[in-house]
Amino acid sequence: MRTSVVDVGSNTVRLMVADAEGGVPLPVHTAKWRLRLSEQVRPGGPVPEEAVERLVGAVAEASRTADRWGASGPLAFATAVVRAAPNRREVLRTVQARTGVPLCTLPGEVEAELTFLAARRWMGWRSGPLALLDIGGGSLEVAFGRGRLPGFVASLPLGAARLTHEFLAGGRDPASPEQVKALRRRVRHQLRDAAARIRWEGPRTAVATS
């Protein structure tokens, strides 16, 4: 069976077409469209109409591409920027009505779990107890596990684009010491509990992805 998945992230819309006849899916085609939603959506703010139009266009093109490759679907998921938007339901309805593709938001904890599963498959069992940090534009997913799936997951509002918008706005390069200090304070505060848990668990291997 040939299937397809669309990932609506904070910066890009990604398509993967894969053959999934049992075992590990085999990718046969990938594509991406740069939308940079995180630059158009303030943290916790609504997705503006112009951004929705661009999102509709990208999802429609992804669907057409998947069809040309003979794939079913696509299964489409949105992550942090759409997930946190107060008008997310309207955005999801608009995308489905205009493209025919049902778009769902992926909870942050599920995003962390799936990324951990991918890291575990990539690293193998010999990597032992595994800690994962996956930074995107809108959020940071953290996970730890000793087996195939994590025993601990967290999704934190520490995405690169989100923090840049909140703490490094104004285009100053390099950032001022005050900006860097405020940014570090926020990151340390948000990471405190997750970092303490991972230190207590004692991972053998740590993997960082983006």
Image (cartoon, rainbow, N blue to C red):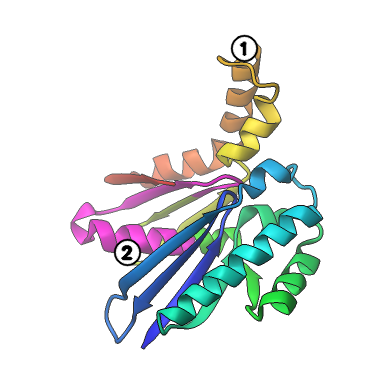
Residues under numbered marks 1 and 2 in contact, where contact means CB atoms less than 8 Å apart: no
* Mark 1 crowdedness (10 Å alpha carbons): few <14, some 14-19, many ≥20: few
Where residue 78 sits, quadrant-wise, is bottom right
Q: CA distance from mark 1 to mark 2?
A: 43 Å
Q: Amino acid at mark 2?
A: Gly
Disc 1: which residue:
176
Is the residue 187 above or below the residue 146 in the image? above
> Along the line of sight, which residue is nearer the eye, 165 or 98?
98
Q: Horizontal and vertical percent for residue 184?
A: 58, 24
> Along the line of sight, which residue is nearer the eye, 109 or 49?
49
In front of the other: label 1 or label 2? Answer: 1
Question: Closer to the N terminus: mark 1 or mark 2?
Answer: 2
Residue plotted at (28% across, 75% down) = 24
Locate residue 132 relative to residue 83 in the image: left or right. Answer: left
Q: Horizontal and vertical percent for residue 3?
A: 42, 81
Q: Which mark is residue 147?
A: 2
Q: Horizontal and vertical percent for residue 140?
A: 54, 46
Where residue 8 sits, quadrant-wise, is bottom right
**Kind of element beneath mark 2:** loop
**Kind of element beneath mark 1:** loop
Residue plotted at (47% across, 66% down) = 15
Is the residue 65 above or below the residue 53 in the image? below
Residue extending farthest to the top is 177
Residue plotted at (63% across, 34% down) = 163
> Along the line of sight, which residue is nearer the eye, 56 or 102?
56
Residue plotted at (33% across, 67% down) = 148
Q: Is residue 126 magenta?
A: yes
Q: Amino acid at mark 1?
A: Ser
Q: Does the rendering let one see residue 132? A: yes
**Residue stretch in magenta:** 113-141
Q: Horizontal and vertical percent for residue 97?
A: 74, 78
